Image: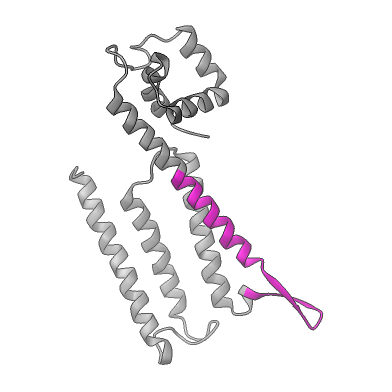
C-alpha cells in the first residue's frame, strides 16, 4: 500500500493516542510494515511533534476523518483503474480456433482492436499515475484524459477505409454525431472544472 507520508502523519496523533478507528490503525500499521525506518523514528521519539508537523493539542477527529477519506479515495481509485485495465487487456487476448488457425476475436476488425487497446492503455496510464503520485486524482485531470482519449478515438474512426467506412458516413452517421457530442461535452466539462479549480471553488 503506497500512500503519501503526509497522509500517515495526519493520522499519527489519533493512532498514538489510542483513539484512532480500526481502519485508521490498519492504514498506519500497513505503512509502518512497508516503512520500518519511519516506524522506528515515529515510535522512538526521534522526531518531535514539531518535526512531524503534528498538532500539539492532540488528535483532531475531523482531521483524522479527512485523512482517512483521502486514503480511501486513493486506494479505491487505484484499485478501480487496475481491475478495469486488466479486464480490457485480457479481452484483447480472447481467441478462437478456426480452420486450425488462432484468431484473436477483438482484432478481426482493426478498428475494434484499436479501440480496446487505446482504452486499456488509458486505464494503465491512470493506474501508473496513481502509483507514482499517491494522491487523489483531481476531477479535471480525469476529464482531460478522457477527453483526449475520445478525441483520438474520434479521429481514428473518422478515417474512411480503415477497418470499415468513416463513422460520419452512411448508417454510422448518428453514432459519429453522438460520439462527437460526447467528446465535446468532456472538453467543456474539463474546462469548467479546471477554471473552478483555479478559482479555488470547492
Quick check: 20 above or below 137?
above
Horizontal side, residue 26 vs residue 190: left or right: right
Q: Quadrant of residue 61?
A: top left
Magenta stretch in the rendered image: 76-105
Q: 51 left or right of 106?
A: left
Q: Main secondary structure of the magenta part?
A: helix
Displayed quadrant of residue 171: bottom left
Q: Is residue 116 magenta?
A: no
Residue at image coords 48%, 46%? 78
| Nearer to the camera, 39 or 181 | 39
Q: Residue at x 61, y 73 (%)?
A: 106
* Residue under the point 25% across and 53% down: 193
Q: How many marks?
A: 0
In the displayed structure, 154 sits above or below 24; it is: below
Residue 71, position as x, y percentages in the image: 41, 36
Q: Is residue 96 magenta?
A: yes
Q: Residue 114, relative to residue 141: is it above or below?
A: below
Extreme bottom residue here? 170
Q: Position of residue 58 (x, y in %)?
A: 30, 14
Left or right: 2 in relation to 189: right
Q: Which part of the image, by quadrant, shows the C terminus?
A: top left
Position of residue 96 measured from the top left corner of the image (x, y, whole percent) = 72, 75
Residue at 42% from the left image edge and 15% from the top image edge: 16
Amino acid at each position: 500500500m503506497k500512500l503519501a507520508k503526509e497522509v500517515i502523519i495526519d493520522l499519527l496523533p489519533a493512532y498514538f493516542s489510542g483513539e484512532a478507528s480500526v481502519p485508521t490503525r490498519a492504514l498506519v500499521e500497513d505503512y509502518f510494515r512497508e516503512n520500518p525506518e519511519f516506524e522506528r523514528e515515529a515510535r522512538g521519539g526521534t522526531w518531535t511533534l514539531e518535526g512531524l508537523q503534528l498538532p500539539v493539542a492532540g488528535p483532531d477527529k475531523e482531521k483524522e476523518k479527512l485523512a482517512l477519506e483521502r486514503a480511501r479515495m486513493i486506494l479505491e481509485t487505484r484499485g478501480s483503474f487496475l481491475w478495469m485495465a486488466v479486464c480490457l487487456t485480457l479481452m484483447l487476448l480472447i481467441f478462437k480456433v478456426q480452420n486450425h488457425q488462432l484468431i484473436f476475436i477483438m482484432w478481426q476488425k482493426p478498428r475494434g482492436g484499436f479501440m480496446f487497446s487505446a482504452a486499456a492503455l488509458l486505464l494503465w496510464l491512470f493506474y501508473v499515475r496513481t502509483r507514482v503520485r499517491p494522491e487523489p486524482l483531481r476531477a479535471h485531470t480525469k476529464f482531460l484524459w478522457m477527453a483526449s482519449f475520445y478525441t483520438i478515438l474520434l479521429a481514428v474512426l473518422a478515417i474512411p477505409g480503415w477497418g470499415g467506412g468513416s463513422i460520419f458516413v452512411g448508417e454510422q452517421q448518428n453514432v459519429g454525431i453522438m460520439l462527437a457530442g460526447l467528446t465535446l461535452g468532456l472538453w467543456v466539462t474539463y474546462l469548467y472544472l479546471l477554471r473552478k479549480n483555479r478559482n479555488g471553488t470547492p
